[in-house]
Amino acid sequence: MHILFLCTGNSCRSILSEATFNHLAPDGLRAISAGSQPAGQLHPLAVALLGRKGISTEGYRSKSWDDLPLTPDIVVTVCGSAAGETCPAYLGPVLRSHWGVDDPSHVSGTDAQIEAAFEAAYALIRARIDAFLCLPLEQLRHDPARFKAELDRIGALNA
């Protein structure tokens, strides 16, 4: 099963999601990420945070959804609403869910405030991925409506 984490820039939230998911997921589950307007580079604070968590970013890059190597089974958008952000709409025959996360790269303030925003985004992403990995995936694969409901429930979780 392949999960696509999708946002606009593919430099921060979707990369945090992809790397964290792949770090935690068992064999048979794999995440990829992409953006509708990729930034072209990973956000250095996202890379630093993942490093502190012991999660490798080797091989990850900011990429366009036009460059996907496969068709995902599930698309999860991670765009936030704080800045009036518009999420890209993936138009394939897949399960879709929205797990909104406000973009920590748009936070201004002290270094501590910015780092806290990145930590909060990571905590929310991690809680949602943990919840996803607890789902009875084999059962849900055969019940798309229930699977969608579970994905949407996870998207409403707060860390």
Image: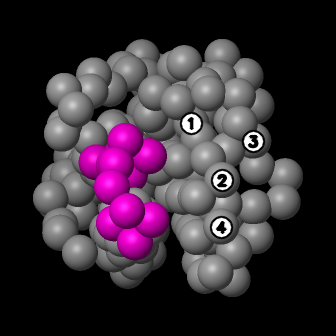
Q: Residue at x 67, y 44 (%)?
A: 42
Q: Disc 2 marks which amino acid?
A: Pro
From this view, report whether residue 155 is shown above or below residue 42.
Answer: below
How would you rate the neighbour count of disc 2 (Cα within 10 Å): few for under 14, some for 14-19, many for 20 or more? few
Q: Disc 4 marks which amino acid?
A: Ala
* Residue 158, image x, y percentages: 17, 69
Q: Disc 1 marks which amino acid?
A: Asn
Counting residues from the N terminus, which is met first, the one under dot 3 or under dot 4? Answer: 4
Q: Which mark is residue 10?
A: 1
In this view, the residue in front, 109 or 157, is 109
Reading the image, the residue beneath label 2 is: 44
* Residue 43, image x, y percentages: 61, 47
Q: Residue at x 64, y 81 (%)?
A: 52
Q: Total of numbered circles in the picture?
A: 4
How would you rate the neighbour count of disc 4 (Cα within 10 Å): few for under 14, some for 14-19, many for 20 or more? few
Q: Secondary structure at mark 1?
A: loop
User: From the image, which quarter does the C terminus lie in?
Assistant: bottom left
Q: Residue at x 52, y 30 (%)?
A: 9
Left or right relative to 36: residue 94 = left
Q: Secondary structure at mark 4?
A: helix
- The stretch in magenta equals 102-113
* Residue 7, image x, y percentages: 44, 34
Counting residues from the N terminus, which is met first, the one under dot 1 or under dot 2? Answer: 1
